[in-house]
Image: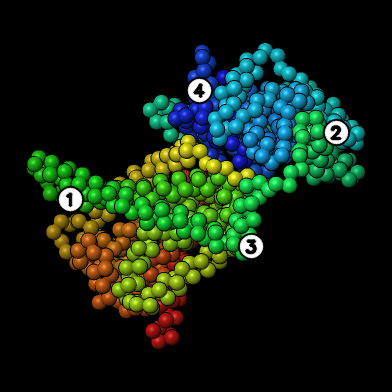
Amino acid sequence: MKIALIGNPNVGKSTVFNALTGSNQQVGNWAGKTVERKSGSIHRDNDEIELIDLPGTYSLTAYSQEEIVTREYILREKPDVVMAMVDASNIERNLYLVLQILELTPRVVIGLNMMDLAKSAGITIHSNRLAQALNVPVVEIVAAKGKGINEFLTEAIRVGKLKSESVWDEIPYPDELEKRIQALEQLLTGTIWASKYPLRWLAIKRLEQDPEIGQTWQSIPRSSQRNKKQDPCHDAGDPLKYVLQESVTLPGEELLQAYEIEGWSKDHFEMAVADAKYQYISKILPEFRVHENSAKPTWTDALDKWILSPIWGYPIMFLIISLVFWFSFVASAPLGGAVSEGMAWAAEVVVSLLQWSHVPEAAQSLVRDGIFAGVGAVLAFVPQIAIFFAFFSILQDSGYLARAAFLGDRFMQLMGLHGKSFFSLVSGFGCNVPAIMATRTLEDPKDRLITMLINPLIPCVPRLGVMSAVVAAFFPGSRGALIMISLLLISLLLVMFSALFLRKVVQQKERSAFVMELPLYHIPTLRNVLMPTWQKTYSFLKRAWTFILVASIVVWVLSSYPQGAPMNATWAGKMGEGLAFIGQPLGFDWRIMVAIVFGFTAKETTLSTLGILYGVAADASQSIAEAMTGAMTPLGAYTFLVVYMLYIPCLASVVTTYKESKSLGWTSFGIAYNLILSFVIGWLVFHGGRVLGF
């Protein structure tokens, strides 16, 4: 049995899904989309159930990816029943989506969630009367407390097994609109499309000139599921992938042109249909909802007076973000250090075994200096990333993330982006990898791609660490603070410039209607925090570590061969000499160029690489930076800092960008853009400084 779980954003779908499926989940992206896909298996009595958690959406039009994915799944996969989640405290807006679902399938069970919050807001919902009004079962639940969830599933299973489908009263449209709908129904009756879609729904979509209907898709068989049981977090993709076979224009073109002349345009039909649905909801609402106008403010009202205040909202947001960063990248440092020490201990044990087995010294160096050093550098950041994801889940589940987007919207508007880009960009100061993954919260594909591409211009913790060491060596005292502030200002100005520039470059391929809602505050559940944290951390490890391993081995080979040769005579040295002509206009010697290239694998390797190249022990970052003072001037150091802050992101960020964008072309563009921008700005800084006498 296939069951689809549908609802508006922030109605508690994730809580219900996690409670029903537990660890039996697969997480990935829908085929061809950057929208997250969750599916889970449930064993109930003798029933084997596949539960699909469809993306949160406000409607089933064809504007955003979430809307298309949700609608097409119902139409193509035809689930046995739909579990529709409804927020009892905001039932009028939620029922709009329910009416659209009922137009596609009558097998619907409504889960009336947040009954406790509705009651505290003075709202009483009579679920039995709601069931009578729509002729569908309604189950009262309080998902955060685990109440009614099993009853919700039991009722869905019952409805899914019914041999006959229930009938619900169709929405009464105004006479002018109804006449036009029936005219299209007559034209479409008997066509192949009427056998694929509900006739009345098809006629309405034809009037709205929906771009998705009229397309024939060929299904591709299921991909191999060999790792489904062993790997509960594998990237499953779409259970069926589709290839567009043909796209035709449905009957009624002449009729639509006649309606256009009469003033019934595509947008006019959309507004008329939506207005009729809301009028229908307003008509039946008094039958099951009693709203007591209580003067007592809710917790949400009380908190929002401070959190959304133009005076206190921004300091509170700054404090919250600071706490997230402190816990993620300062308090987690001992955990990262423990991982590094564990990897060093493991390397010693493995190397000791290799020595005992008389394995050649070159192989020992590969294991110690290549494999364990490279992979250990990545694993040391796993605690930081895991803690960051945990806080991100807390902020999202509590309802604060939407407020942060609302507050940040003012700054994002200057760059032509939406407020939700704000949290992703700010997160980049911690680590660009989770910040790029955080773009999943953006509904507009164009905003999502632009935010991904400009995110690496934000210096992450490893880059800030290297920059701090170099600044301390070349610009001691209070000058160092001013230098760091100037670097961050350059970063932010280039982020704004790049966003405006990319807004002209990135073409909008999909229409997107965005609605931002400020949900009621919730106390996050432990499961809703731990499950996404584990899934995203696992996804990061799975995507990144294999590439880091290969890259680390390559770096070791380049810096170790020919064996016994001085560093400038190794392959890495030869590579540096070949790149010297690029660095010369910026005052860089070959060592700096090699460190910049090696920093691509992981930014934190830059100092250790410089230590090797300058002949300094790599266990003291300050001495490495001081060694650089004999090789370059303060102006050269500042130029290096600018280039290092802006140039190509680390390998893990590149891989994550490709995975999230699904585009090798845009990933390559991002790499080239960062390289060109960093060296152009570096050249301007170096030569501008010389002109000014620095």
28 shown above or below 386: above
Q: Amino acid at mark 2?
A: Tyr
Give the labeled residue for mark 3.
310
Q: Secondary structure at mark 1?
A: helix
206 or 149, nearer to the observer: 149
Sequence-first tag of 1 and 2: 2
Q: Which residue is mark 2?
A: 173
> Marks 3 and 1: CB-CB under 8 Å?
no
Residue drawn where x is 50% and y is 22% of the image: 42
Mark 3 → mark 1, Cα distance in angstroms: 58 Å
Q: From the top left corner, tell me how far across and down residue 562 is, in percent.
A: 17, 57
| For discs 3 and 2, the disc positioned in front in the rendered view | 3
Q: Which mark is residue 42?
A: 4
| Mark 2 or mark 4, earlier in chain | 4
User: Disc 1 designates what residue?
Assistant: 365
Residue 174 x/y as whole percent: 88, 35
- Tell me how many marks there are: 4
Q: Nearer the viewer, mark 4 or mark 3?
A: 3
The N terminus - image quarter: top right
- What amino acid type is highlighted by mark number 1? Ser
Q: For numbered disc 2, what is the local secondary structure? A: loop
Mark with earlier residue (3, 1):
3
Identity of the amino acid at label 3?
Pro
User: What residue is rendered at 62% in x and 47% in y?
Assistant: 299
